[in-house]
Image (spheres, helix red, strand yellow):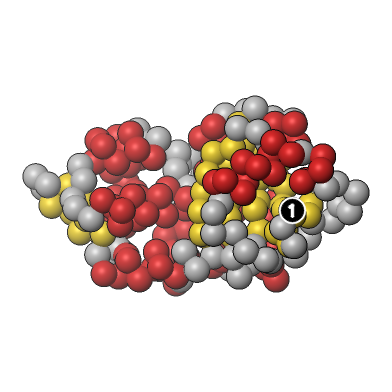
Amino acid sequence: METLKNLCSHIGAGYLFSIAHFYLILDYLSSVKKPVGRYILGKKIGLGQGSIRTVLRRLSEAGLISTYKKRGSQITEKGSVLLSELKKYIIEIEELNDAEQLTMYPFNYGFQIRNFLNMVGTGIKLRDEAIKFGAKCITSLLFKNDNFIILGVDEFNIKRDFNKLYNELKQKFETIRNNDLIIISAAENKNIAKISLLSAIILLIIS
């Protein structure tokens, strides 16, 4: 995780990318298993050509990707090992269509997180970090006994009170098991909803 810490330490004010974009590039390159050009990567993760050039250069300097002039970029063994470490915690990321009633914001992403409960605690630190990156609302749901419990709030019953959301969560997170967290990030922009919470989660993992 030291490699990620070093990458994170070089992201200052004025940059249009965050630590989440490093993860998304590694994840995408791992899934396609072949070199991908800069233009396609930028479109895939929502970065302009200037930003994606900088991100790829830093990943290459860290030894996490290899870049070839005519073929594009490909994940290295070192990059695959780092991604595997992160995926011990980040199991699945899904856009949610039925969470607005709960969060009161139109764009929502759910993150299935494992081995993370001790880190997130009541969710206050995670929420504060995500809000720094632009999220409007963070809701942490603990899966237990076939239901979702909102951390720190006892009166809500997701299965009973938000049945459409409950069904969507069960459908999209097929590998959910007891003590997994579904953390929902809400924002007024789809990209911010995803990037803000992913950045906060990674920062907590490497802290």
User: Residue extending furthest right?
Assistant: 155
x, y percent for residue 42: 32, 37
x, y percent for residue 13: 52, 44
Look at the image and tell me in which quarter the C terminus lies: bottom right
Mark 1 surroundings: few (<14), some (14-19) or many (≥20) residues within 10 A: many
x, y percent for residue 59: 31, 57
Could you say which is closer to the camera, residue 201 or residue 61? 201
What's the residue type where badge 1 is placed? Answer: Phe
Residue 65 lies left or right of residue 195; in this view the side is: left
Residue at (35% x, 38% y) in the render: 44
Residue at (69% x, 36% y) in the render: 164
Residue 193 lies left or right of residue 165; in this view the side is: left
Could you say which is closer to the camera, residue 59 or residue 105? 105
Residue at (40% x, 68% y) in the render: 84
x, y percent for residue 148: 74, 53
Reading the image, the residue beneath label 1 is: 148
Give the answer, above or below, for where 47 lies relative to 4. above
Give the answer, above or below, for where 9 lies relative to 169. below
Residue at (47% x, 58% y) in the render: 8
Q: Quadrant of residue 80?
A: bottom left
Number of marks in picture: 1
Residue 75 lies left or right of residue 176; in this view the side is: left
Give the answer, above or below, for where 72 lies relative to 81. above
Q: Secondary structure at mark 1?
A: strand
Q: Is residue 24 visible?
A: yes
Q: Is residue 10 visible?
A: no
